[in-house]
Amino acid sequence: MSVGKLRDYHAPVWDESVVMQLGYPGRRGQIFPQPEPEVVAAIGRARDLVPEAMRRASPPALPELTEPEVQRHYLKLSQQTLGMINISLFGTCTMKYNARVSEDIARRLHDVHPLQHEDTLQGILGIVHGFDLILRELSGMDQFVFQPGGGADAAYTHCVVTRAYHKSRGELAQRNEIVTSIQAHPCNAATAAAAGFKVVTLMLEDNGYPSIDALKAAVSNRTAALLINNPDDMGLYNPDIKDWIRIVHEAGGVAFYDHANFNGVMGKLRARELGFDACMYMLHKSFGAPKGGGGPAVGAYGCTAALAPFLPGPVVAFDGERYRLDADRPHSAGKVREFWGNIPQVLKAYAWARAMGAEGINEASDLSVLANNYMDKRLAGISGLERSHPGIGVRRMEMTRWSLGKLKADTGIGTVEVANRMADFGIDPFWMSHEPWVVPEPFTPEAGEMYSKEDLDTWVDVIAQISKEAYETPDLVRTAPHNQAIRQIKGDVLDDPKRWAMTWRAYQRKHGR
Amino acid sequence: MSKVPKRSAAQKPPAKSSDPAVIANRETRAHPWMANALDPIKRAMLAEIGAGSIEELFEQIPAGHRIARPLALPRQLASEWELRRHLVDTLARNQTCEDHLSFLGAGCWQHHVPAVVDEIVGRTEFLTPVWGSPQSDHGRNQAWFEFNSQLGELLEMDVVQLPVYSWGCAVGHAIRMASRITGRHQVLVPRLLDPERRSVIRTYCEPSEMASHIEVVDVAFDPTTGGIDLKELGAKLSNLTAAVYFESPSFVGLIEAQGATIAKMATKAGAEVVVGADPLSLGVLKPPASYGADIVVGPTQPLGVHMNAGGGIGGYIAVRDDEKYVRQMNGFLVSITGTLKPGQFGFSLASSHQTSYGMREKGRDWTGNSVYLWAIAGAVYMSLLGPAGFRELGELIVSRNAYAVQRLGQIKGLRLPFASGIFKEFVVDFGATGKSVTAINEALRRKHRIFGGFDLSRDFPELGQSALYCVTEIHGKGEIDRLVDALVEVLS
């Protein structure tokens, strides 16, 4: 494959010290008002008001910097972060434009306290309820809550709701198993275990998903729930999903749809119409809220009316005239996080859904599947690459799991090395795969609807270039990156308790600097 | 135009600008957020794929799975102006703690957020990334390390992980860590615990039907001080106790003067000592590790994050650099390391295999997206304050609370039961006024544009008609006097 002309890129190199090394004794970045003379006269010195046994003995060893010094330090660090300035096709995470108008408007929530009286919250409660209605229409569910602080927390919420549901039927002690698949996100298995369930994991067959027979063998009167995604991260849609849910229901379990991979199916199907009892959407992925390098995030959790009494409260309710926070929910499973959610992110997701409308949402799923299939076609022409489950000829959904197993066998260059080298072209390193790797040396691009055909071509060109380098100059790739803020990190320290240092004070103690 | 760099074929427009198809495209209303929403591009991509239509690409989904009726959503607002107008108009129905004087705290607090913090967390580079690599996102990883390092100095602890969703979630994980470490399944918590945190803790400790259930047992408070009742603590501690959890400052604002005694008693019983602490208090208060804490947790929102209707919250977890604890951490640990270039620093995840990403259901609880942008806010905030700022802020908060307590205590009918040795919150008992907290707060809000304290009467009936008031650096003498005057009028 021919490679288009690639950008001559280099990241900013600031060689910036750790903030703990900066400053000068006595410099201040913020000062606070002095207590008023009348206050001092009335109550005396502040330090005398702290019980002597609890007074801090020596000041914390924090840096002492002026305000502009702090600003410039963190501006430099921001410049040494790629962010979404160029092209990031990070699979399973659905990279989208995060509209600045939403960021601007969200400032109006800065000084809102979650325990304010409902009369003072009618605007934001209206937005939350309005977005609840939008998600109900997309999913067919009856009620959404926004308390979970991420996708994994929404999976946890489902496990918690499942507990309360079975408890209400007197079956919780008996129903102590949750079924999931090896291709489901690790958080499904992990949160099920953290909620106290045993985890039953189904393995994949040649067609890319577990067999119905395996599912039948796994479910019983001990089954509490099924946690599953569809399509999976390989871009494969399980056509038997309705039968799966029927089998779980017949066994008495509830079925949860991890809708992390929503972008390819939004507007195309509804979770409820497939039979699911509950689902979750990641507002920081599918709904255009920013990721913040890992939150604040929202796993919007929705369920049927049968499960709704068990939701964590409060739930935003509307009586036709007034919005309120309904916390009087005697069957609630209890809270998974304080208050009612990362509300600015809900506002941004609502804004995204309103800006897109039904027609925009449908077009976005069209374009994301179109883009992935276009990339599939181009990537297939690059040496050393192979699609996961190559025997499956169907067109994949909005992402595809690829394998660099052949490249690794041919050249010794695997997926970690390729990811490192990508950054030399200003392209965000790709997502590889969740554990366990079901294909060798995996990577998983997801184009989404935002990026142009030109962007996609550039991304594929970069992969083609790195493949070429792997065959011709493998050391160039092995020692990458070369054009980044720093060189390749040394990983050996990271699992060595004698040398790892999670804080500067630990570093100074262990490394004597 | 010879200076314009040459672009690859892929970056050229599809045709000359005189092409009728291009002109037709210019008359479309293609959505501003979707670059390929143009027929010629779609056709070109379909041609490359070898498909006749986009519909063909959905071949995996059985017809019977497709949506039963078309989406019925509110009207599209694709123009930024219409969208902005709609959002602004809707949010105008809110009232805020900026246009009102607020004394609400109870898990989310109004502090001053320096403008530089807002600038840095609003930077696209920090706002938008998903993960990247230690090299491509070096600056973000360094900022994370600087958050953990600075919080580590305030706490005098060597290991701080990236924040979890909230303080309550941090307590939940810490209790579960203690249960794994000790093999025991009971935790002692203070009766005077934030009801929101309590609910989360109970969720994390699982219902009694689960094999890994952890029993949550209340320890009464000393009715004269509001602190932990040591006699009851002694009676309830046993070889079943996995952890004792207490807070200083506590939910009711009290600086727990018996911290060292409580820690000693718990340790003697073989239990882990889990302490919750507001980091803003640590400029003036001893770090919990110095009086015996094994695991320290607390809120991150006070460190430069706006309240955001509760969307500003986060929780930290810190431990000693001891594998007994470190190997039980659920979240991401960021270590400093070297690079191929001698003397250069890099930052990456340490001991990461133990997380749910590495070990699925065998990992330590779970992790994932959390509130990592707020770690950057906290890093900036702590750098701005420095040691002198934390001391000055802590002393200011303490003195303003003492002043508020003194003034409110002079109002006839008000009783401030636990107000000796407090940090930024305190209980006001309105019982003797014959008025309910609900009625008082309603009058404060409607007549005086004041949000009164959090009503404790529902969750703590033993405290009667009491409210939890929060006073911070944003409440000057004038604001406190205004509250006093308003209360005098409301109660007259």
Image (cartoon, coloured by chain):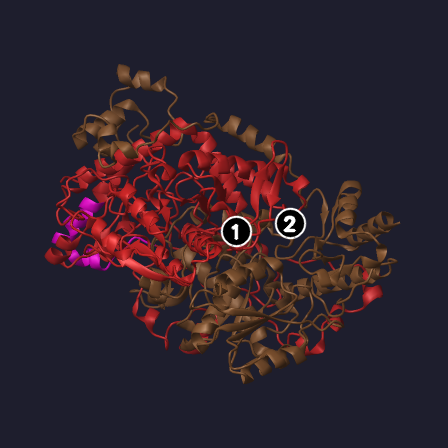
Chain colours: A red, B brown
Q: Disc 1: which chain? A: A
Q: Is residue A397 above or below residue A363?
A: below
**Can you tell which quarter of the image residue A231 is in?**
top left
Residue B73 appears left or right of B338: right
According to the picture, the residue beneath numbered tag 1 turns out to be: A312
Question: Which segment did they paint magenta?
Answer: A463-484
- Please check the rendered image and state whether residue A479 is part of the magenta-colored stretch, yes or no: yes
**Can you tell which quarter of the image residue A319 is in?**
top right
Residue B63 appears left or right of A112: left
Few, some or many C-alpha atoms within 10 Å of disc 2 (few <14, some 14-19, many ≥20)? many
Q: Residue at x 73, y 70 (%)?
A: B421
The amino acid pointed to by label 1 is: Pro
Is residue A359 visible in the rendered structure shown here?
A: yes
According to the picture, the residue beneath numbered tag 2 turns out to be: A115
Count numbered badges in the picture: 2
Q: Which mark is residue A155?
A: none
Q: Residue at x 60, y 40 (%)?
A: A108
The amino acid pointed to by label 2 is: Leu
**Can you tell which quarter of the image residue B388 is in?**
bottom right
Instruction: Tell which of A345 and B230 is nearer to you.
Output: B230
- Please check the rendered image and state whether residue A319 is part of the magenta-colored stretch, yes or no: no
Of discs 2 and 1, which sits in the foreground?
A: 1
